[in-house]
Amino acid sequence: MLAFVVVLMQAGTRPPAAGEFHVATGGNDGNPGTKDKPFATLEHARKAVGRLAGEGLTESVTVRVHGGTHFLKQTLRFGPDDSGTTEHAITYAGARGSPAVISGGRAISGWRRAAGGCWTVVLPEVKAGKWHFRQLHVNGRRAVRARTGFMHVRAVKRAPGGKALYYHFGPGRLKSWKRLEDVEVMVIGRWEILRRGIVSVEPAAGRLSVTGPERVPHPALAARKGVYAYVENALEELDRPGEWYLDRGTGVLTYLPRPGEDMSRAEVIAPVLHRLVEISGTRKAPVRNIVFRNLHFRHSNWKLPPNGYLGTQACHHVGGEKWNARPRGVVEPAVGWTGAEHCRVLFCSFSALGASGLHLGERCAGNAVVRSSFFDICGNGVMVGIPGWDPGQKKAALVPRNNHVLDNHVRACGAELYGAVGIWAGITQGTRIEHNLVHDLPYTGISVGWDWTPKPTPARGNVIAGNHVHDVMKVLADGGGIYTLGSQPGTVVRGNHIHGLRRGRHAEAGGPVYGLYLDQGSKGFRIEDNVVHDVDKPLRLNRCDRRWHTWKGNTLLAALNTPVLREGVKGKALSCGEAGRGMELPHAPAADPAILTVEAWVKLNRPPQGKDNRRWAVSKNGDEWTAGHYGLLVMGNRAGAYLNIGGGRQNCFLAAAKQPGLKAGKWHHLAMTYDGKTLTVYCDGKPAGRKAVGRGRKPGRGNLTLGDRSDQRRGFVLPGLVDEVRVYRRALSAGEIAARHAAPLKAPPAGCSGHWGFDEGAGIPAAIKAVMDRAGPRPLTRPAGARRPAASEPTGEG
């Protein structure tokens, strides 16, 4: 299948003119659908193709969709009668030239100036209760529903009798909004959000009550003291350019333009349809071999559930009375497939959407989403799978199989539903998520797996490889660059590059953010050659065991700084203060023998001062209370060495120099040895302190850090230079340590297993750089003479 997709990407599918129809915005459905006399609507073209399919296809068919915005009056639905065959594809392709936009929206005109710099227009369908929308795009740019700023929830209380739930914000934070039935409150949970309608508001008391009946969310997702919230869709809050408000009672739409926007000429579009395109095959009659190429899907609607949106994860929400009740609700996609086989999306874009983008659901098999863009979407970008798995249902035949998401660009999703992810795969088999660029998201980048349990499900054999994920987790917490959940034997996580993750300022205080997050029940993975850096925490294993997976060649770092080098004892030295966090390197057995010697040359800008004057020159395996930790450090103007054997404070051993010996601006040779009995620290070739231990040391698997403590908490960066760091797999004698101090340029004695001299250059190690260079969408290659994509065609490249 993959080879077939690549060939199709390179060569395209161009049937003979006899198998070709044309659709243009200026066409007529009474025309024959030729290039000169095109159809007007895609629906008419679909019916024309269906008639051919019903007669039996003898060749592939292409519908050329000419440039312009094609407004759909109803969802474009494809069933078994519209299907291609194994041999012959039915392709809906944007013609060369201007973009072909498939819109589920409606253009709004007739604007008039109003007070306060606003513009208004009356929409009779809204007043009549026939139309409501939550999104508005002005000149292709998403406008913002009028809202307050972020506010802290001070308390959540239930009224006597339990019939009303009150959110307290404090006096002066709320207003007496006139159209209260239009107003909503949005509350940020740890990894999802909730949105509720408002029943009453008491500005003097600073509290409001929300719509019910009250359902019970997970405690981490419920409104509670200290979390952030805002109130949205009130005319009284329309005070910033780019905001709008829709009054459902009068049908009046009000907008405050951004600088330079002329509403008498602006293109303003609001969504009407919830679903733009649907493929619905059956178990006995799947829809096969339909291709969408170079089309732009825009403007879909989304409706808030009657009792509000209580998110559970990744745009799934409470379906019953409790947060984990089944079935879960799921935010509907703009383009949804079920029972589709060997259908493809190539060089398309999905944007300006009110819910999620594209969902390949039940019984989808062998489909591919390639070289497409997903952005400016309220929910998830791409979805593959079914929302949950109930073993009692025994519906393994529904599980999507062998679908591919390749070389796409996914960004700026979760515009309204902050718990959205870029690419989501639920209970699936053989899903390949490869070489995608995923960034600028409020929550997780790529999420694979479902159900919080290690018990077997049909999920297995998925591949998440070569993806470039950065700058996600910008609003919520408790997620990561790549997040997994549940047992998925045979799943591979390989060669991904994840970086630039920081907890957003409105996320729950202390909420975790991880590069690679293996959550509850994750089991049976092969995790290899991934590079994670510049994140709060590179890895989390939550309610799963590291031994449940196979690990190989991963680089999991909090920071991957290009070193700042200065003149050293020999050649160059690492400047720790200028590098900010020192230099972190991935675990290697050579850096962590059971019996060991560690040596380094150190030059302090100044001896550290203060209540805690410890600064690490060499550190491995977390802090001094972490099992397996060793550290060579300075303590003011004294040398010191740590070992931890067994974990915890009680198993931490320190050998510290009794006399000061370190001076600013001078190179000093520091060393530590452990022979299985005694920990010894040396300063300038002489024993400076000893600590009897008498325990066998078990090496750790944590990172090696030079010029900082391995957990990289603030305050332990060495103020100066480090050079000629070596690790030996034996305890050197006192004479050998003295010789190392006296002649630093001589060859080291036997047993040296690791050396960091900083003279090989300041670049990132070649193996790590290779993974970083390969991650993300691959360069588009074509056979000689093949056409280049039109300027309007998304390439999926960053």
Image (cartoon, grey):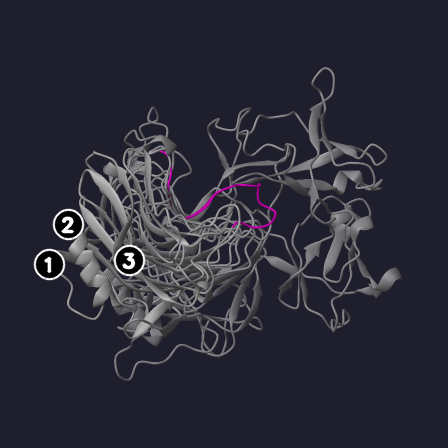
**Left or right: where does residue 11 sit relative to residue 320?**
left
Question: Residue lying farthest bottom?
Answer: 785
Local crowd size for mark 2, using a 10 Å CA cut-off: few (<14), some (14–19), many (≥20): many
Q: Which residues are magenta?
A: 503-520
Residue that mark 3 sits on? 495
Q: Report if the CB atoms under discs 3 and 2 are less than 8 Å apart.
A: no
Q: Amino acid at mark 3?
A: Gly
Q: Earlier in the sequence, mark 2 or mark 1?
A: 2
**Residue ID at (31%, 59%):** 466
| Secondary structure at numbered mark 2 | loop
Number of numbered discs visible in the structure rendering: 3
Q: Amino acid at mark 2?
A: Arg
| Secondary structure at numbered mark 3 | loop
Q: Report if the CB atoms under discs 2 and 1 are less than 8 Å apart.
A: yes
Examine the rendered structure and indicate whether residue 546 appears above or below residue 666. Answer: above
Q: Earlier in the sequence, mark 3 or mark 2?
A: 3
Q: Quadrant of residue 338?
A: top left
Q: Residue 467: within the magenta?
A: no
**Left or right: where does residue 228 sit relative to residue 245?**
left
Would residue 680 be visible to someone looking at this image?
Answer: yes
Point out the frontmost of discs 3 and 2. 2
C-alpha distance separating marks 3 and 1: 36 Å
Image quadrant holding the C terminus, namely bottom left
**Residue ID at (64%, 34%):** 306
Residue that mark 1 sits on? 750
Image quadrant holding the N terminus, namely bottom left
